[in-house]
Amino acid sequence: MAGNSTPSSAALLHNVTDIVAKRQRLAYIYVDSNGLIASLSSNISDYGFVDIKVGDEVEDAVDFMVGLDTEMELELPLIGSPAGIPVSVSLVPQESALLILIADASRMAEARQRLQQQANDNELLLYEQRRLMTQLEQVQAELKQKNSQLKEASQSQTRFISGVSHEFRTPLTSILGYTELLEKAVSEASASDQSVADHQLKIDSSLVAVQRSSRHLLSLVENLLDHGKLDAEELVIRPEAVALKDVVDDIRFIMLPLADAKGIKLRFTIPTSPASEIVVMDASRLRQCLINIVGNAVKFTDRGGVAVTIDWREDWLSVSVQDTGPGIGREQLTKIQLPFWQSDDHTKAGTGLGLTITARLLELMGSELRVESELGSGTLVQFELPAPSAPQAVKSDLAAPQSIVGLRFLLAEDDPDIALLLCHLLEHQGAQVVHVSNGALAVEAALAQDFDIVLMDLHMPVLNGYQAIEEFNAANYSTPIVVMSASSLVTDRSTAYELGCAGYLTKPVNIADIAQVVAEVLDSEGHDPSS
Amino acid sequence: MSSTSIEAIKDRYRHSLPDKANELRALIKKLKRDPVAEQALVNAEAFLHRLAGSSGMYGYDAICECSQSSLGMLQQGQLAAAALAMQELTELLDRSA
């Protein structure tokens, strides 16, 4: 078997070698021990080795052989042949000779190129992936932030609704409670056949409480409405002449009961001068700001008190509100003017709009809200506001009604109901009153004693008002006479003035009307009631 | 006089409103019975004049307004309209008492 196999194996090997050689387009160069080309395959020219021939120095004929160590096997896997075909070269030393095998490596080069391309593509994909990842992370971070803001907004909205409900419920409950008390007081008076006057104190205090709660509700509604205007930039400031005292009195009236209910002190310090000053400013807006600031101070102060100082110097009004409340931390202090911001103390919920609106209103009025606070050290809120003194003419118009204290009145009035009421009102204001019920008695009384003013009804028995005035004229009576009549006829008025009356009042009259006319009459007559 | 409270004075007036309503009813009856009687007319005008003044001062604005309009109708000779207005006035007085 072995004897038979040798020739066929040699033939098979030859065939295989031939197939591989052809498939790989294998070429060779055989170099002798002197470095000269001893033989070469005929297909060597396929690779561009066209000038090569037997007997050439191998290093001269084949470029890649320059400087190579020819005594050891060497693989050059991918090099370019002179024909530009990628080839793989194997150097196989054979004793002192050298066999150079050259194979077509186009497929390998293509494969390598594809691999390289793939590697490049992969690199590009990685780069793109990294870029997208970075973008994704940024978007995720932004989403996280937006989500956090939305969550915060949602929480603020919930707190706002809860706060508004709480704020509205308190005064509404108070109004309902006090109106029930009012109803009870009136029905008790009816049931016991007593006059309502006997229950007046209870009724008055209930009415004051209802008014106070209603004012508080109104200020809440104003804040809510103003917040809408704040967004639309529609807040308007309307300066007018106003007595500072009136504004301060309003705040005191609204806030003192709140402080009393909490058992804390609320002290107002107002130097006399500014209290009596009449200045030009938007009193309604100032009132709103003070209600918000003082209201907050009272709300958050559970022990100690709140000190409000209001001063006016050289056309500037300065306001300072110091409380002994829990104070505000530094971080929170930067947020207190943000809309809907509220303290962590949820028992003191509000709308979270008061300071936002106050700061904006003060800004519109040329001022700035300043808040200083530290945790545990209370809070100080301050602002200065331009408040120029009102012109003298305006001040006179706003001045307090003329006092009738000490004036001596002769009242001629036949209606006992009117006479009773007027006597009471005039005497209550510090005047002295002598009442007569007809014109004849009026003349008699006037000529018998001194009066500063005569209030004369027209329609009276015995002598009517006109007839009595004619009697006065006949006697050269000089005390000013003011006619009071339910008649609004122009003829009555003109007749009264033709008869020399100093003033004319149409009934119904009130004490302020009388004081005003009396002041005008006495001023024009140059009368000094103190003389 | 000043020792009397304003509430008591107002209360006194309120208690007088039924009497005023009755007085007005009597005046209306006289006017209806003899519309041309001069004295009945004078008495009605005087009553309305006083009521217009006093009711307004005590805060009864509706009575004051109705008195003034009734008086104006009487003075202009609109007796039928005045009678209706005075009838309304009696109801106002009754309701306010």
Image (spheres, coloured by chain):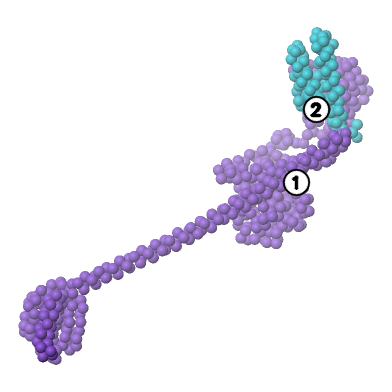
Chain colours: A purple, B cyan
Q: Chain of mark 1?
A: A
A283 sits to left or right of A44: right
- Extreme front residue here? A1
Q: Which mark, by number, is residue A365?
A: none
- Position in image of residue A531 (x %, y %): 87, 32
Query: Which image quarter: residue A429?
Result: top right
Q: Residues within 10 Å of mark 1 (few under 14, many from 20)?
A: some
- Extreme top residue here? B36
Circle 2: residue type: Ser
| Residue holding disc 2 | B96
Q: Could you tell me if the residues under marks 1 and 2 are in contact, i.e. CB atoms within 8 Å? A: no
The answer to whether residue A274 is seen in the rendering is no
Q: How many marks?
A: 2
User: Residue at image x 85%, y 34%?
Assistant: A190
| Residue holding disc 1 | A252
User: Residue at image x 86%, y 23%?
Assistant: B19
For label 1, the SS is helix
Using the image as rendered, state which of residue A372 and residue A405 is in the foreground: A372
Distance CA(mark 1)–CA(mark 2): 36 Å
Circle 1: residue type: Arg
